[in-house]
Image (tube, rainbow, N blue to C red):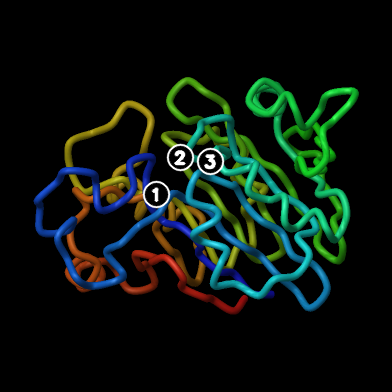
Amino acid sequence: MKLTFLGTGTSCGVPVIGCQCKVCQSTDPRDKRTRCSALVETETTRLLIDCGPDFRQQILPQPFRRIDGILITHSHYDHMGGMDDIRPYCQFGQIDVYADPQARQSMLEMLPYCFAEHRYPGVPAIGLHEIHPHEPLHIGDMEVMPIEVMHGQLPILGFRIGKLAYITDMKTIDEAEMSYLEGTELLVVNALRFDKPHHSHQLVDDAVAFARRVGARQTYLIHSCHDIGLHEEVNRILPVGIELAFDGQIVEI
């Protein structure tokens, strides 16, 4: 199984428009962060996790082949604002999209023309499915277990796929969810920055502590803003087995 980080940034992306900080002015491509999204692939199945407003830019360098399912973590625009751009992939057939009740409703409101009784030609062909924590999905040769984490006061979804656990926008997690993370070897989890607490996102220290609780062999940090610092400098100080991910990075699982 292969994981490709399409985007590793927050809702503003990096560089932030108008910002002159050293991260936003960096020439290191690893400091350019589009909105969070990832591909998880086997030889026969291809899943997209989130489809934000940078999806078109992110997917152009990738091989053009069928997307078997799109997993939506939550209803915020930076995680589903690029759904209209999946239309070229609909030449392979309807694309199944899996979302919790709130994200499903938001998608119906954001893309009403995709779900109208009489759709005009060319709109994305979406099969929209409501999913819930702890109810596994079988998509191709992958089993996906949705788990619940808290994005501030908003319950959202993380996904366990084999030895991979993918979690973004988490602030806290209920102890009861930890059993679904047992045996995780590769953990992907959000880490906004090092300091200045946020009401709905973990900081780096929170993410490191969480990674140690999970006990994954390797952890990659995502959903990071420009305040986190330069990619090279951050990775120099992170504990062994924990790295700051970057856009375009590929990891074999």
Q: Please name whichever residue, 114 or 3, is drawn nearer the observer in this view of the structure.
A: 114
Relative to 7, say whether 129 is above or below: above
Residue displayed at 39% across by 58% down: 221
Cβ–Cβ below 8 Å for labels 1 and 3?
A: no
Q: Please name whichever residue, 190 or 173, is drawn nearer the observer in this view of the structure.
A: 190
Number of the label disc, if any, that sits on residue 169: 2
> Tag 3's secondary structure?
helix
Relative to 174, say whether 143 is above or below: below
Q: Residues within 10 Å of mark 1 (few under 14, many from 20)?
A: many
Real-space Cα separation, disc 1 to disc 3, in angstroms: 11 Å
Residue displayed at 17% across by 58% down: 23
Residue position marked by numbered label 1 in the rendering:
223
Q: Amino acid type of disc 2?
A: Asp
Cβ–Cβ below 8 Å for labels 2 and 1?
A: yes
Q: Please name whichever residue, 214 or 107, is drawn nearer the observer in this view of the structure.
A: 107
Q: Would you identify the image quadrant in which residue 141 lies?
A: bottom right
Number of the label disc, if any, that sits on residue 25: none
Q: Earlier in the sequence, mark 3 or mark 2?
A: 3
Coordinates of residue 208 in the picture (x, y in percent): 35, 55
Q: Amino acid type of disc 3?
A: His
Number of the label disc, if any, that sits on residue 79: 3
Q: Residue furthest front?
A: 121
Q: Nearer the viewer, mark 3 or mark 2?
A: 3
